[in-house]
Image (cartoon, helix red, strand yellow):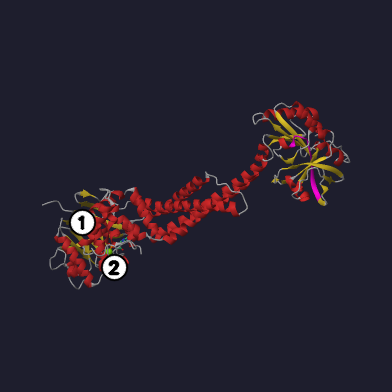
Amino acid sequence: MSKPLIEIQGMTKVYGMGEATVHALAGVDMTVEKGEFVAIMGHSGSGKSTLMNILGCLDRPTAGAYIFDGRDVSRLSKNELAEVRNQKLGFIFQSFNLLPRLSALSNVMLPMLYNMEEDISDEDAEKRAAASLQAVGLGERLHHQPNQLSGGQQQRVAIARALVNNPPLILADEPTGNLDSRSSVEIMEILHHLHKHGATIVMVTHEPDIAEHAGRVVCVKDGKILSDGHEGNNPCLNKRMA
Amino acid sequence: MKFKKVLRTAWEGLMLNKVRSFLTTLGVIIGVASVIVMLSVSAGTEAAIAEQINALGANLIIVSPMRGVPGAGRTMMIADAYAIEEQVVGIDGISAEQGPAPQIVKGNGITLESIAVIGTTADFPNVRDYAVASGAYFTADEDERKAKVVVLGAGIAKDLFGDTSPLGQTITVGTVKLTVIGVMEAKGMVSDVDYDGRVYLPINIVFQKFMSEMPIGGDRVRTIYVKADSQENIPSVITQITALLSERHDVSPSQPDFTVQTQQDIIATQEATTAAFRDLLAWVAGVSLLVGGIGIMNIMLVSVTERTREIGLRQALGARASDVLLQFLLEAVILSLAGGLVGVGMGVGGSYLFGMFGGMQTAIVPGSIPLAFGAAAVIGIFFGYYPATQAAKLDPIEALRRE
Ligand SMILES: Nc1ncnc2c1ncn2[C@@H]1O[C@H](COP(=O)(O)OP(=O)(O)OP(=O)(O)O)[C@@H](O)[C@H]1O
Ligand SMILES: [Mg+2]
């Protein structure tokens, strides 16, 4: 079997100092294989976003190792982290984070702007962005601005943006948190489809029925992993907890 | 990230808020335009002064009694002028001049009050580059034998005789009857002197008829103009005149009772006054550029705050701190360069308008355009740098969380 995409050992993240110290992550071990679809669940404040930020190379752990795609990224410089984010990560946010007043196409082209690996010509960048939007069913909406699109459509633009540099890992922090149930279903169908075609996805969610789409559910509490897997006694999948 | 791409990103950033971008550049536009207008106005003033002084005559050396030295006004005599004419080598002519009190001039049944009377020697038109339009100037011989002749300034001729020729007519200057033998060409005002509104008489007649009652003798001269025969000979002529007059006046050449000046000296004195004026204007313009720069910094800081989420997103998508820094720095530089460009246009246009309708001479200083433009660029970098560093040092997580 090939090497795992994500390997985390003894990861801690401590915020603040002295009395006000918060252990947002208190020793997390986790492995994600290529092609997995993982849902992370847990109460508010349990450390899900903190974990996602470190997985997404937006932040560095206080202690612990993070091997991503065969490389220890826990001690990289800020510029190196920026490059990893650009090349190997696609982000989907709860609040979409599209740039207003830019077209869907321009929004999707943004990651290619910062691609240091290859110098993509404007024409190619447009083609790739258009293809990416096509893949999420927005081929007819290339030149719409975010405020001309529904929430679900905006999130699909964000997915197209996350995919455009062909990253090995997609990170989604509550991707359906701001959407109605119908749009949520649409978004989950797209993620499902991506997963079936080999994408590795790590997604934070509060909703058990959204988590059902994932092959594996990691339950976090107080900065630690409480349970990992789809077994029936997963406390996060217990409807009473949701 | 390629520079070209950052540049485009910066441009797009500015285009998203066109009105604000324009208002931000306004300070720089005004600053740059005022630098150019002010420099062109003061250069125009200087050119006008130099033009006027050169109109006094080419290669001219001006000898006058030293101001502020008691008794100096009494020591410069017509004999000094003759001595210069005879002994100084390298000159093309001299013109001694004296002006008594203004006189009443009558002729052709018309009376003109308070007309300046100038006594000169015969070489006056040559030395002062001031030609006779009709008739002739008096000769040295006529001067010496105190011929009762007069040459009219163009304005006086017109006032008295209209379009008919005054040649051969008799006019009265004060109580003296004189025959008109010539009319000078129109020259206009030069350094506040109305050459056309004067009458020109042989200096010896002036001594005899207008100055003899004065208690200190009649044959003093106000100014001796000496025309050097070439530009190169001017220093030597000055040295000779200084030595000659010092000896004649029995004074030390280091403490003379007279001054020997060239037009360049006079221009330089005038320029010193306009330079002070110009420096003041330059400061005003510089301050307005500075204010423009502070305006850019202000708006860029607001912009960074407003666009915090955008910055966080760009960072999440792979923008490095240097990419963000460059983007915002370039926005500021584009703003100030655009302001500089428009300002140059407005400054050049404004200078022309001032020259045409503002009643002052303007000359666009070619160097002021790159100067003003360069200053705008420097201001963009200087005042854009701080907001750009504020953008670049944002933490992506914090920035994305911001509303
Ligand atoms: N920058 C920070 N400074 C101090 N404490 C922080 C910081 N970021 C997060 N924390 C704390 O770390 C803990 C974990 O926060 P985190 O955002 O990871 O929770 P979460 O599981 O994502 O919650 P939610 O479901 O509400 O999004 C919380 O107690 C939070 O207050
Ligand atoms: Mg969270």
Callout 1, which amino acid?
Leu
Say which of B340 and A22 sits in front: B340
Say which of B381 and B176 sits in front: B176
| Ligand 2 quadrant assignment | bottom left
Q: Which residue is mark 2?
A: A149
Chief SS of the magenta region: strand
Give the percent coordinates (x, y) of residue B188: 70, 46
Chain identity of mark 1: A
Q: Which residues are magenta?
A: B113-124
Tell me, yes or no, whether the highlighted magenta stretch contains residue B289.
Answer: no
Query: Quick one: quadrant of the C terminus of chain B?
Result: bottom left
Mark 1 or 2, closer to the camera: 2
Is residue A66 visible in this depiction of the protein?
Answer: yes
Chain identity of mark 2: A
On the picture, is B39 further left or further right than B387?
right
Q: Secondary structure at mark 1?
A: strand
Which quadrant would residue B316 be assigned to in this image? bottom left
Binning the other alpha carbons within 10 Å of mark 2 as few (below 14), some (14 to 19) or many (20 upward) gives some
Q: Secondary structure at mark 2?
A: loop
On the picture, is B323 further left or further right than B296?
left
Q: Is residue B203 above or below residue B332?
A: above
Is residue B99 visible in this depiction of the protein?
Answer: no
- Which of the numbered marks, if any, corresponds to residue A169? 1
Q: Earlier in the sequence, mark 1 or mark 2?
A: 2
Callout 2, which amino acid?
Leu
Q: CA distance from mark 1 to mark 2?
A: 26 Å
Give the percent coordinates (x, y) of residue A18: 34, 58
Q: Are marks 1 and 2 on the same chain?
A: yes
Give the percent coordinates (x, y) of residue B68: 77, 39
Say which of A194 and A6 sits in front: A194
Residue drawn at (25%, 57%) of the image: A129
